[in-house]
């Protein structure tokens, strides 16, 4: 085997030997949709930002509800799931994908970002940038899933800051269960935020896209700047589309197609409540 081939082969993650990243069979153009995905309703916080900042874009939202939560799954499993989802988006001919999932961004983004022929936006760098720009004392808190915290992805993206990280494994099941304003959720949040408060941070990154759904409760408990990475991530997606001249030429309101791997009815009910907009016609797919 030629030396260069050997080097290339050793850099390939074994997951890519099972799932080959798919090329975009339909050539993406200005009218192609943007893809967003998450394990469940978390990525709707990112979709809400797309609706604000990119109102004319069509989008495909995929909630992998059959496999939620991602937070405790092994990194190899997360990478495999990400490849399956990105292959689905390649088949749909998307022009860009936003990883509307902190866990995927922390674990899979670096490995998949150059494997597809559409740009992929993660939550990590944009979230870190936003936090650094607002923090005055450079003491920054990060709350996220166990998986994201284990990678220290946000911490690594916050050079020079004193970072306090806390995994909040119960938040996603509580949110997916619809316990957004429940007393139990408030109690759990108080426990999780105690070390963050003690560290006297002035800024807190909501490092899992589900957590902005709890912004009300979190704001009652901790009086600091809350950073929703979606705002900066969607701004990044917007600037990529601008630099590639890929804004939708049709200036009417964009359409969103929803797909789930679990129950469409359950997603429609909770998703509509959280997005504040009727979600209808959700389709079930197998990846
Ligand atoms: N909303 C995702 C994240 O940002 C996934 C959480 C999960 O499924 O555990 O991390």
Image (cartoon, rainbow, N blue to C red):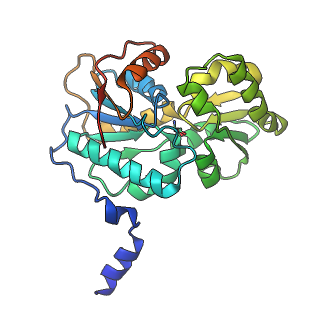
The residue lying at 59 percent from left, 47 percent from top is: 148
The residue lying at 35 percent from left, 41 percent from top is: 97
**Where 238 sits versus 4, above or below?**
above
The C terminus lies in which quarter of the figure?
top left
Give the x, y percent position of residue 225.
Answer: 68, 28
Residue 220 is at least partly visible in this image: yes
203 or 242: which is nearer to us? 203
Horizontal side, residue 254 vs residue 182: left or right: left
Residue 108 is at least partly visible in this image: no
Going by the picture, which residue comes out furthest to the right? 198
The N terminus lies in which quarter of the figure?
bottom left
Give the x, y percent position of residue 26.
Answer: 15, 44
198 or 269: which is nearer to us? 269
Determine which quarter of the picture holds residue 17.
bottom left
The residue lying at 45 percent from left, 29 percent from top is: 46
116 or 170: which is nearer to us? 170
189 or 244: which is nearer to us? 189
The residue lying at 32 percent from left, 57 percent from top is: 115
Determine which quarter of the picture holds residue 184.
top right
**Where 16 sits versus 218, above or below?**
below
**Where 227 sits versus 255, above or below?**
below
């Amino acid at each position: 085997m030629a030396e260069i081939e050997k080097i290339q082969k050793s850099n390939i993650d074994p997951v890519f030997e099972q799932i080959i990243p798919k090329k975009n069979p339909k050539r993406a153009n200005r009218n192609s949709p943007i893809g967003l995905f998450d394990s469940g309703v978390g990525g709707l916080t990112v979709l809400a930002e797309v609706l604000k900042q990119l109102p004319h874009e069509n989008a495909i939202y995929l909630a992998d509800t059959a496999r939620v939560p991602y937070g405790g799954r092994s990194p190899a499993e997360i990478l495999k799931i990400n490849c399956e989802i990105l292959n689905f988006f390649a088949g749909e001919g998307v022009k860009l994908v936003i990883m509307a999932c902190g866990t995927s961004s922390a674990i899979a983004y670096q490995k998949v970002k150059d494997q597809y022929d559409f740009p992929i936006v993660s939550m990590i760098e944009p979230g870190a940038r936003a936090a650094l720009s607002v923090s005055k004392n450079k003491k920054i808190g990060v709350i996220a899933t166990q998986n994201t915290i284990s990678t220290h992805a946000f911490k690594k993206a916050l050079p020079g800051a004193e970072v306090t990280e806390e995994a909040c494994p119960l938040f996603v099941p509580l949110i997916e269960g619809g316990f957004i304003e429940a007393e139990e959720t408030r109690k759990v949040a108080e426990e999780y935020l105690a070390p963050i408060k003690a560290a006297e941070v002035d800024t807190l990154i909501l490092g899992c896209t589900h957590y902005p759904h709890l912004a009300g409760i979190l704001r009652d408990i901790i009086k600091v700047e809350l950073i929703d990475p979606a705002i900066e991530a969607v701004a990044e997606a917007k600037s990529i589309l601008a630099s590639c001249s890929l804004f939708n030429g049709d200036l009417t309101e964009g359409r969103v197609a929803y797909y789930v791997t679990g129950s469409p009815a359950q997603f429609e009910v909770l998703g509509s409540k959280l997005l504040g907009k009727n979600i209808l016609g959700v389709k079930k797919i197998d990846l």
